[in-house]
Amino acid sequence: MTVVEMHDVQKAYGEVRALEHLDLAVERGEIVAVLGPNGAGKTTAFELLLGLVRPTAGTVTVLGEPPGRRVRGRVGAMLQSAGLPEQTTVRELVRLVGRSYPQALDTGDVLARTALTKRAARTVTTLSGGERQRLLLALALVGAPELLLLDEPTAAMDVASRRTFWEQARASVDDGATIVFATHDLTEAATVATRVLVISQGRLVADTTADALTHHGDEDLEEVFLTLTHERSVAEGDD
């Protein structure tokens, strides 16, 4: 089943073209990494999939429906811009968010799954950066989503926390979910994702596996990324 599909999608903010004729599809059970430099259009693509903004042109479908209220209860999301009520406890917040979904998971199970059981009585303001990210994952998971959209999910985590995070996220795929995540970490994308999408200047410039992208290890992933996104020429032009 196709979980996410974007066909000839364009998004403009005045004179700024955030996305240009973007075509992509994600199938059930995939873990797809979305790579691209700052301003490439990754966050805009996520906002379109969540129904937070509408495309200027083209079509977007999520779980066979237009993004929005009809599928909201089947999608979990972690966004960079997400704010959290600082004085609420971890347990209270997970339970509260769970109540907004038709088939929420047990709060205790979600806390255990995201290694937050010992932090359940703590307020959000006392959490470390990595713990806050795990809490955001718990909020994304509590509704038993069929699709997880994760925007830079491990940005504030150390190596050990990152490994634990992806173990937890993969468990949701074992339960039938699909994951699409944006990252600047090329190694993370190569290690975690079953497929890699590279976006540059609002266009899809690569859709393949990390292994194929590097010609089975013959080329350096970072070098390939810089070439695909034209970041090398930009950097050299600044010298």
Image: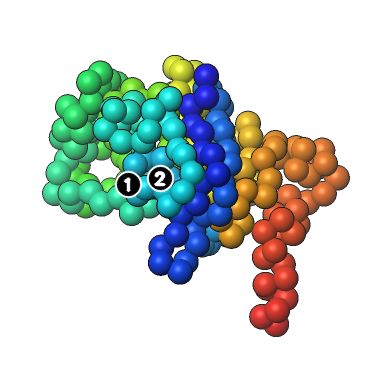
Q: Name the residue that disc number 1 marks.
A: 52
| Image spot of residue 161 (x, y percent) | 46, 41
The number of discs equals 2
Q: Residue at x 63, y 40 (%)?
A: 196
Asked whether residue 238 appears in the rendered view, the answer is: yes
- Going by the picture, which residue comes out furthest to the front? 57
Q: Tell me the kind of residue under disc 1.
A: Leu
Q: Secondary structure at mark 1?
A: loop
Q: Residue at x 47, y 66 (%)?
A: 16
Q: Secondary structure at mark 2?
A: helix
| Image spot of residue 35 (x, y percent) | 59, 49
Q: Quadrant of the C terminus?
A: bottom right
Q: Is residue 43 left or right of residue 98?
A: right
Q: Residue at x 70, y 79 (%)?
A: 237
Does 154 sit above or below residue 212?
below
Asked whether residue 108 appears in the rendered view, the answer is: no
Q: Name the residue that disc number 2 marks.
A: 48
Q: Is residue 21 left or right of residue 142?
A: right
Q: Is residue 139 left or right of residue 183?
A: left
